[in-house]
Every structure is written in C-alpha cells, then in structure tokens.
Image: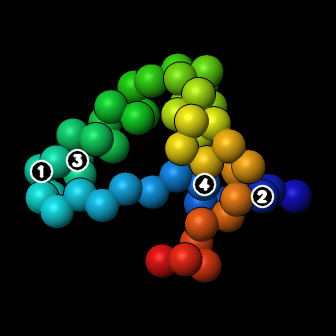
C-alpha cells in the first residue's frame, strides 16, 4: 500500500521558476529532501487539505 502526502509546498509565480525548482528538488538526495521537509514541516503534516 502506497501512502502519498503533500508535506512541502511553495508559492512560485513564474513557470520557469517552478521548473527550475522542481529540477533542483529531483536532483537532490533523499537526505536533502528529508532535511527540507523537516525544516519546513517537522510534523510531516499532510498539507493537501490546505491548498
């Protein structure tokens, strides 16, 4: 069973900046991604309901 949660979000107004940010996140290591989430959403709360 897969679990999918939105645990990190950002407001980015430009499509080009969105693409750049997505590529940065994809290129990062799993450890870097976990650190980012822990810094911005330490409880790993599902943010999808807040959008």
**What residue is drawn where x is 60% and y is 54%?**
7
Element carrying mark 3: helix
- The mark that comes first in sequence, 4 or 3, is 4
Residue at figure coordinates x 59%, y 60% from the top left = 6
The local crowd at label 4, few if under 14, some if 14 to 19, many if 20 or more residues have their Cα within 10 Å, is some
* Residue of label 1: 16
Mark 1 lies on a secondary structure that is helix
Residue 8: percent from left, percent from top: 52, 52
Q: Is residue 4 above or below residue 21?
A: below
For residue 35, side relative to residue 23 (left or right): right
The residue singled out by tag 2 in the image is: 3
Give the CA distance from mark 2 to mark 1: 29 Å
Give the number of the mark in front: 4 or 1: 4
The reply to whether the C-beta atoms of the residues labelled 1 and 3 are less than 8 Å apart is yes
Label 3: how many Cα within 10 Å (few below 14, some 14–19, many 20+): few
The quarter of the picture where the N terminus appears is bottom right
Q: Secondary structure at mark 4?
A: loop
Whether tag 4 and tag 2 are in contact, CB under 8 A, the answer is no
Which image quarter: residue 45? bottom right
Q: Residue at x 33, y 31 (%)?
A: 24
- Mark 2 or 1 closer to N-term? 2
- Mark 1 crowd level (few <14, some 14–19, many ≥20, 10 Å Cα): few
Q: Relative to 8, say whether 35 is above or below.
A: above
């Amino acid at each position: 069973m897969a679990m999918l949660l939105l645990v990190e979000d950002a407001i980015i107004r430009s499509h080009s900046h969105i693409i750049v940010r997505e590529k940065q996140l994809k290129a990062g290591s799993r450890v870097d991604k976990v650190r980012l989430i822990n810094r911005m959403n330490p409880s790993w709360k599902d943010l999808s309901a807040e959008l």
